[in-house]
Image (cartoon, rainbow, N blue to C red):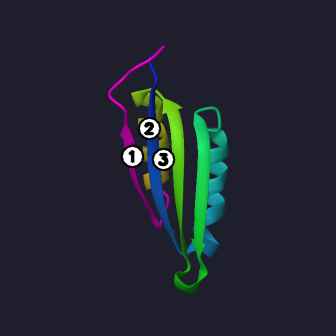
Amino acid sequence: MEKRLGFVGLIIEDREHNAANVNMLLSEFGDIILSRTGVPCPERNCSAITLVIDASTDQLGSLTGRLGRIAGVSVKSMLSKMQHA
């Protein structure tokens, strides 16, 4: 399985209700997450999370697909062009 370096950007709306589901899912994918940075925005009841990942296209698709099915979560991602084993 060839992996690439990439990132995932998340915006979580209605943070009080949706953050726990996001955190549980990110824990499941902990083996591909190299870095996680979160910025809460309590005055807007939302937060932003940036992940740096080392993943295959299948792993990235699984992660972003499942994140995108969580209510109030917007997700965007990108992988580098260079692959490594």
**Image vertical order of residue 63 relative to residue 83, above or below:** below
- Of tags 2 and 3, the one toward the viewer is 2
The residue sitting at the left extreme is: 81
| Residue extent of the magenta highlight | 70-85
Label 2 amino acid?
A: Gly
Q: Is mark 2 on a helix, strand or loop?
A: strand
Question: What residue does disc 2 label?
Answer: 6
Q: Say which residue appears at 60% left-offset and 50% top-offset.
A: 36
Contact between marks 1 and 2 (CB within 8 A): the answer is yes
Question: What residue does disc 1 label?
Answer: 77
Q: Distance between the residues labelled 1 and 3?
A: 13 Å
> Image quarter for residue 42?
bottom right
Most foreground residue, 36 or 68: 36
Q: Position of residue 15 (x, y in %)?
A: 58, 72
Instruction: Tell me if residue 3 is in the magenta stretch.
Output: no
**Image vertical order of residue 75 relative to residue 48, above or below:** above
Instruction: Please give left or right for residue 28 compared with residue 10 in the image.
Output: right
Q: Distance between the residues labelled 2 and 3?
A: 17 Å
Label 1 amino acid?
A: Ser
Q: What element carries label 3?
A: helix
Among the two numbered marks 1 and 2 on one chain, the one whose residue lies closer to the N terminus: 2
- Of tags 1 and 3, the one toward the viewer is 1
Q: Is residue 69 something one can see in this rendering?
A: no
**Image vertical order of residue 22 relative to residue 42, above or below:** above
Q: Is residue 17 something one can see in this rendering?
A: yes
Label 3 amino acid?
A: Arg
Q: Position of residue 23 (x, y in %)?
A: 65, 54
Instruction: Please give left or right for residue 46 compared with residue 78 in the image.
Output: right
